[in-house]
Image: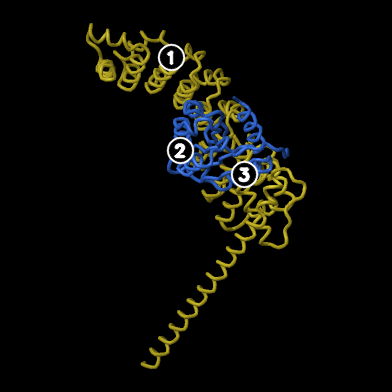
Chain colours: A yellow, B blue
Amino acid sequence: MVRLLTFSAVALTCVNAAIGLWLIVYRLVGNRRLRTLAAARDRLKPAVLGWIDGDEEPPSQANPTDYLAIADLLASYGRAVRGGARQRVADLARETGMIERMIGELRSRRGWRRAVAAYRLGDLASREDAAQPLMAILRDRDRRVTAASARSLGLLGAVQAVEPLVRGLASGQLTRPVGAQALRLLGTEASASLANLLTAEEEEVRAMAAELLGLIGNVGRTDQLIEVLDDPSPEVRVRATRALGRIGDSGASAALQVTLSDPVPFVRAAAATALAKVGHSDSFDQLIEIAQNDVFVSAHAAAYAAAYLQPEQVELLASKRELSIHLQEAADLLQVVG
Amino acid sequence: MANDDLNLRVLAADDDPDILDLISYRLERSGCEVIRASDGEQALELAISRQPDLAVLDVMMPKIDGYEVTRRLRANPDTAGIKVILLTASAQEPDVVKGFEAGADDYMTKPFSPQELRLRLVAVANRR
């Protein structure tokens, strides 16, 4: 028994020592690789900057470390520049086989590898080369991958990705910050595709498209948002109403005023707030009526909207007659604000 | 890309060394002397000690942001004449207005075009 225990102790000590030694060697080799890569980066930096600046001679690659250093430099600079300089980054990445390799990495079994490749494609690739492969992984099971893909599609200005991005947002596959940021990067270019989705079959997709149009804030889409104010889904109507308020186009005032009579209270509340944002003073009497007699959510919004549009009138009303608690609150607030 | 002889001393301030690389490379090729700073405090010190003709300042810098650096440059008679181009990630109107109110001469958004920066720099430098 004692011999067995002694043998076990010696064996464990040997295993520990071997693992320790392996870790030290691994660390040393790793550090050496990092130092070699940093040195290659420093050496190749002028050549890469020269290429981005328009030089005809591409940076030379003597070995795999040089290849990695150039990829690293191109990614760093690629995300900082646009226009011709960004195109030069994409050209070199394609010519050296980097793009093909990264697109291959998108099929890796390891999620982090797919995510890194998706992220780097956004910094290095052109829209023509990378949009399709990135769209193909927008429904990846790994959220790191979908987030990286959405971010890169936005950076590349891949307008064709609007529909899958919206559907990803509506289904919860993409988180709101990730999807919305990608669409924000696409900017007004995305608004035509978003407007088409206002008539999509799925309620969630229509609602998301309306909300995103408001965030992008393109006045040219006001008419299409107004049409959605008749949508059978109150969720779609409320988001279209908020979008119109956010865009602030006075051309939407009449439609928003009609929406004050929507059968659903939170749509009426959104309409009141939107009318205040648009600055439609003509709706004042209707807002006062709602603030006095409607249910809590819409009355509260209408009172604040009325006070925002015509503060003196609300203060005058407060001094002359008995008001609803919402209007009284708005009038009190006006006094505090001065 | 154009390699000319602008013969200007330019202060470039950004906490991102990659951006500084890109600015320095393009402007040095255009005949500028580029002084690099990695935060707002260093940018102010270098502006006072080296008296550049023009400063390209990132807005979101550590210690002192680009707006405040611009204000302080304008408030100091020794540095009030330095032309300023702000470089920022935000293209929102309020941020642009804030930059001009601080005293900036021009404004560029990131990601930026090095060639466009050179052209704007020439335009700003030629203003009286």
Residue A229 placement (x, y as % from top left): 49, 19
Residue B117, horizontal then vertical, whole percent: 63, 35
Taking the image as shown, residue A53 lies to the left or right of residue A302, namely: right
The chain letter under disc 2 is: B
Mark 2 crowd level (few <14, some 14–19, many ≥20, 10 Å Cα):
some
**Please, which residue is most extreme toward the top here?**
A320
Residue A71 percent location from the top left of the image: 65, 53
Q: Callout 3: residue from which chain?
A: B
According to the picture, the residue beneath numbered tag 1 turns out to be A279
Whole-number angstrom distance, CA of label 2 to CA of label 1: 35 Å
Question: Mark 3: which secondary structure?
Answer: helix
Placement of B37 over or under A216, stated as above or below: below
Towards the viewer: A186 or A34:
A34
Which label number is shown at residue B65?
Answer: 2
Three-letter code, disc 3: Ser
Residue at image point 68% right, 59% down: A66
Q: Residues within 10 Å of mark 3 (few under 14, many from 20)?
A: many
From the image, tell me which residue sits under label 3: B24
Circle 1 sits in a helix, a strand or a loop, which is it?
A: loop
Residue A333 versus residue A131: which sits nearer the camera? Answer: A333
